[in-house]
Amino acid sequence: MDELAKSRMIWRSRRGMLELDLMLAPFVENEYEDLPTETKQLYLELLKEEDQDLFRWFLQAETPPQPHLVEIVNLILERHAQRGPAT
């Protein structure tokens, strides 16, 4: 993925909540490029969801009602935990 495409994907991942931005932007910056095509599609589908739903899912207060989105939510949470808090 070239820098322009990466920048566009980061921009697409920006949400109305800082907490979501801190989860999604680093995921795109560090992980997205190496994902299999199927997982990239799941990520794009995840971006269609409402911020409040994403927030609850990333807090692990709820799980996505769509079973296929559970995979990408768990992957983002796992990679976020491995990276640690943003500095």
Image (tube, rainbow, N blue to C red):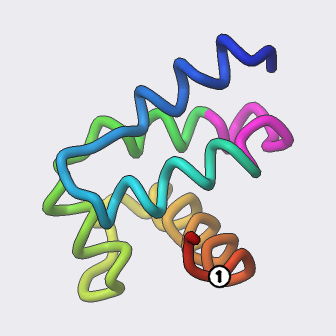
Q: Residue at x 53, y 18 (%)?
A: 8
Drawn side of residue 75 relative to residue 77, left or right: right
Circle 1 SS class: loop
**Image quadrant in which the N terminus is located:** top right
Which quadrant of the figure has residue 63?
A: bottom left
Secondary structure mostly taken by the magenta-highlighted segment of the chain: helix
Q: Residue at x 63, y 43 (%)?
A: 28
Is 81 located above or below residue 20 in the figure?
below
Residue closest to the far bottom: 61
Numbered-mark total: 1
Which quadrant of the figure has residue 13?
A: top left
Is 32 located above or below residue 9 in the figure?
below
> Could you say where residue 76 lies in the image, as x and y percent from the top left?
58, 65
> Could you say where residue 44 lies in the image, as x and y percent from the top left?
48, 33
User: Is 1 or 45 nearer to us in this picture?
Assistant: 1
Drawn side of residue 25 relative to residue 75, left or right: left
User: Is 23 or 66 nearer to us in this picture?
Assistant: 23
Q: Which residues lie in the magenta part?
A: 31-40
Drawn side of residue 74 relative to residue 52, left or right: right
Q: Residue at x 19, y 62 (%)?
A: 53
Residue closest to the far front: 87
- The amino acid on which the numbered mark 1 sits, given as a three-letter code, is Gly
User: Is 73 or 23 nearer to us in this picture?
Assistant: 23
Q: Is residue 25 magenta?
A: no
Q: Residue at x 85, y 41 (%)?
A: 34
